C-alpha cells in the first residue's frame, strides 16, 4: 500500500485528442499525481509532449514504458482493439491501470481481462465511464439513492454529437465497433448505474444513415435508437447520433414511481441567453470534451486517490466503473449491434 502522501507516478499511453486532455489534467490539475512518462508511436504526438508536458520520459513502445520502475500506473487512451491486452500487460507488470472505454469490442476478451485482474486484487483497474463523475449525474445518483423519485424503473438517455463534415466518424467506423459501442456504451453504463445495476435480458435496435453514406460499408449508422429490457421490469431507451446541428447534446432522464429526474436536457455552454431577431436561445456545448471537462478531471482525481489509498476495485458511489461494469456495457452494446444488423430482438 502506498502512503497517502506519496505521489502516484503515471504514464499516459496514447496522445491523440483525448489523450492530450488526460495528459494535461494529470500533469497540472490532479493533486497527488505526477506525469512521469508518455508513450506514442507517432513523432508528432511525442513532439507535442515535449512542448506541453513537464519533461516526462518519452517512449515509442508500450513494453518499454511498462518496464520503467518509476511508473506506478498507466493511463490508456489507445484504440479500442488494444485495450484488453494492454490492461492485461499492465497488471502483469504490476501497474495500476486506468483505461478509456470500452474494455473491449469482444465479450470473451472482456471476460479474459476479468479473470487476469482477479489475480491482482491489490491493483486498481478502472474503465473511463466519466459520466459517473459529472456533478449533475452524481447529484441525480445521490437523489435516487435517497428515494426522492421512489423506485427508478426507466432511463431515457442519449449521446448525440455535432455533425462532423470532415468525416472523422466514417474513417473511424472500421475500428469503432459501431455507433452503439462507441456512443451508446456510455448511456448503457449510466442506465445500469442509475437503475441499481440490473441484468439486461433483451434488446432491440434500429438505425438510419441520414448523412454519412460511407458508414454503410461498415454496417454502421449515423443515427440509432434502442430499447433494453432489464430484470425486475426495468427499462432503458437510447438514442445515438452523429448528425446534430447544434452541438454535443448528451442528456438523460430517470423515471421513478414517485417522480423523475432530467440531467442536462438543455446542453447549454454557459448561462448566457441571447435575445435577438431569431428569438431567445443559448449556445450549446460543441463537443464532449467541453460537456464533460469537469467529469474527466474528477475521475482522474478519484483514480489517483484510490491508488494512494490502496483500495482496489471499489464499489462506492464515488468509484469509477469496474471491469465487471465494462463487461456488461460491452455485452449489451454488442447485442444492440447484432440487433441493428439482424433486425431482430436479441436475448441476453
Image (tube, helix red, strand yellow):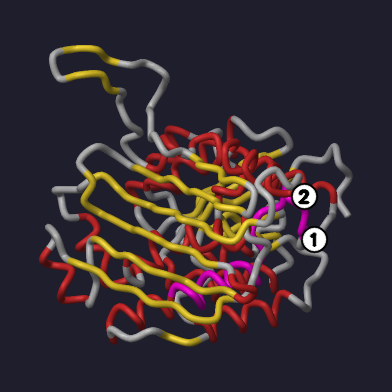
Query: Secondary structure under badge 1?
Result: loop
Horizontal and vertical percent for residue 76? 53, 58
Q: Disc 1 or 2, which lies upstream in sequence?
A: 2
- Answer with the quarter of the image where residue 321 lies: bottom right
Horizontal and vertical percent for residue 26? 59, 39
Dot 2: few (<14), some (14–19), or many (≥20) neighbours within 10 Å?
some
Say if mark 1 contacts mark 2, CB within 8 Å.
yes
Q: What residue does disc 1 label? A: 312
Going by the image, does 42 lie left or right of 303? left
Name which residue lies at 53% across and 69% down. Answer: 329
Name which residue lies at 60% across and 36% down. Answer: 135
Going by the image, does 259 lie left or right of 342? right
Q: Is residue 190 above or below residue 304?
A: below
The quarter of the picture where the N terminus appears is bottom right
Q: Is residue 331 magenta?
A: yes
- Answer with the quarter of the image where residue 56 lies: top right
Residues drawn in magenta? 314-333
Name which residue lies at 64% across and 38% down. Answer: 139
Dot 1: few (<14), some (14–19), or many (≥20) neighbours within 10 Å?
some
Q: CA distance from mark 1 to mark 2?
A: 7 Å
Is 243 in front, or is 170? Answer: 243
Tell me, for residue 306, which label it has, or none: 2
Name which residue lies at 58% across and 54% down. Answer: 75
Q: Is residue 273 visible?
A: yes
Q: Is residue 299 visible?
A: no
Q: Is residue 332 above or below residue 264?
A: below
Horizontal and vertical percent for residue 311? 83, 56
Amino acid at each position: 500500500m502506498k502512503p497517502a502522501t506519496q505521489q502516484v507516478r503515471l504514464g499516459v499511453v496514447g496522445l491523440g485528442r483525448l489523450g492530450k486532455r488526460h495528459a494535461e489534467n494529470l500533469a497540472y490539475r490532479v493533486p497527488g499525481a505526477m506525469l512521469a512518462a508518455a508513450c506514442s508511436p507517432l513523432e508528432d504526438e511525442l513532439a507535442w509532449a515535449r512542448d506541453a508536458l513537464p519533461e516526462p520520459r518519452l517512449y515509442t513502445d508500450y513494453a518499454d514504458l511498462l518496464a520503467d520502475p518509476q511508473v506506478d500506473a498507466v493511463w490508456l487512451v489507445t484504440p479500442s482493439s488494444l485495450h484488453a491486452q494492454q490492461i492485461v500487460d499492465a497488471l502483469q507488470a504490476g501497474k495500476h491501470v486506468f483505461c478509456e472505454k470500452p474494455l473491449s469490442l469482444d465479450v470473451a476478451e472482456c471476460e479474459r481481462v476479468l479473470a487476469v485482474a482477479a489475480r491482482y486484487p491489490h491493483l486498481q483497474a478502472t474503465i473511463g465511464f466519466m459520466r459517473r463523475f459529472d456533478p449533475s449525474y452524481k447529484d441525480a445518483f445521490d437523489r435516487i439513492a435517497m428515494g426522492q423519485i421512489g423506485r427508478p424503473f426507466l432511463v431515457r438517455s442519449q449521446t448525440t454529437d455535432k455533425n462532423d463534415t470532415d468525416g472523422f466518424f466514417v474513417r473511424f467506423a472500421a475500428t469503432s465497433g459501431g455507433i452503439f459501442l462507441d456512443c451508446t456504451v456510455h448511456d448503457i453504463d449510466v442506465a445500469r448505474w442509475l437503475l441499481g445495476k440490473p441484468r439486461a435480458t433483451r434488446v432491440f435496435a434500429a438505425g438510419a444513415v441520414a448523412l454519412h453514406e460511407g458508414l454503410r460499408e461498415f454496417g454502421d449508422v449515423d443515427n440509432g435508437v434502442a430499447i433494453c429490457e432489464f430484470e425486475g421490469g426495468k427499462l432503458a431507451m437510447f438514442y445515438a447520433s452523429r448528425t446534430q446541428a447544434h452541438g454535443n447534446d448528451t442528456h438523460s432522464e430517470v423515471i421513478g414511481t414517485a417522480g423523475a429526474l432530467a440531467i442536462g436536457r438543455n446542453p447549454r455552454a454557459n448561462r448566457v441567453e441571447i435575445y435577438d431577431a431569431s428569438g431567445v436561445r443559448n449556445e450549446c456545448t460543441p463537443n464532449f470534451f467541453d460537456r464533460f471537462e469537469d467529469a474527466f478531471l474528477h475521475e482522474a482525481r478519484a483514480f489517483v486517490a484510490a491508488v494512494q489509498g490502496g483500495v482496489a476495485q471499489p464499489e462506492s458511489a464515488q468509484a469509477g466503473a469496474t471491469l465487471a461494469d465494462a463487461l456488461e456495457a460491452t455485452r449489451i452494446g454488442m447485442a444492440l449491434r447484432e440487433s441493428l444488423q439482424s433486425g431482430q430482438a436479441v436475448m441476453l
